[in-house]
Image (cartoon, rainbow, N blue to C red):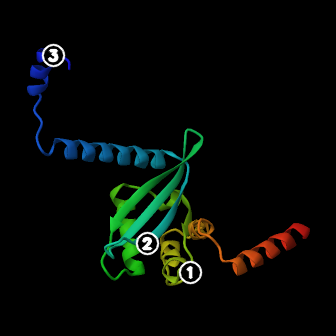
Amino acid sequence: MFGEDHVQNIKIIPLFNSTVSRRIKDMSIDIEATINERIKKGPFFSIQVDESTDVSDLSILLVIARYLNVNELEENLLLCCSLTQIVTVEDLFNATQGYFCENEMDWAKCCGVCTDGGKSMSGCYKGLRGRIKIVAPHITWSHCCIHRQSLTAKPLPDSLKEVLNQSNQSCKFH
């Protein structure tokens, strides 16, 4: 398409099997470093923590960070790691704490934690919420609305739809 000269120039570029995967890894390391620097430079940040299971029944810990970057709120995936088959609150906390330590992130700048309503997450004494409160007592906790969003994306049975419509109308009058 471009001629023989260009073909010869392209042939001299060394490409190994691992070149693309190495470059992808380098880019992801750079993106992670940029996000971590933005979080550290900002006045505060918050995290949303969720433990889920993938299709191969492997537990995954997801931590999403919200932070200010040049006076604009940004949201990025901070941590995604696989965990052991049986996940405890200590596993969740240690994975998060380990990432914070490794990347020199300060719990003092974390102003909020958002989790789902499961006991392992939201328990104020034995859950992740309680475990984080030990190292950062100032943090506020909120309930995640992801599951409600998931519910609204599904078709509702008529009986549930009727109840929700009635409660919505009664809220309008009060």
**Helix, strand or loop at disc 2?**
strand
* Circle 2: residue type: Glu
Image spot of residue 120 (x, y percent): 48, 81
Which dot marks residue 124? 1
- Name the N-terminal-most of marks 2 and 3: 3
* Circle 3: residue type: Gly
Taking the spot 52% from the left edge, 68% from the top edge, the residue there is 136
Residue 137 drawn above or below residue 70: below
Name the residue carrying label 3: 3
Image spot of residue 149 (x, y percent): 60, 65
Tell whether 92 sits left or right of 130: left
Determine crowd level at label 1: few under 14, some 14-19, many 20+ residues with C-alpha closer than 10 A: some
**Helix, strand or loop at disc 1?**
loop
- Mark-to-mark CA distance, 1 and 2: 17 Å
Q: Nearer the viewer, residue 120 or 167?
A: 167
Q: Quadrant of the C terminus?
A: bottom right
Taking the spot 80% from the left edge, 75% from the top edge, the residue there is 167
Please tell me whether mark 1 or mark 2 is closer to you in this view.
Answer: 2
Name the residue carrying label 2: 51
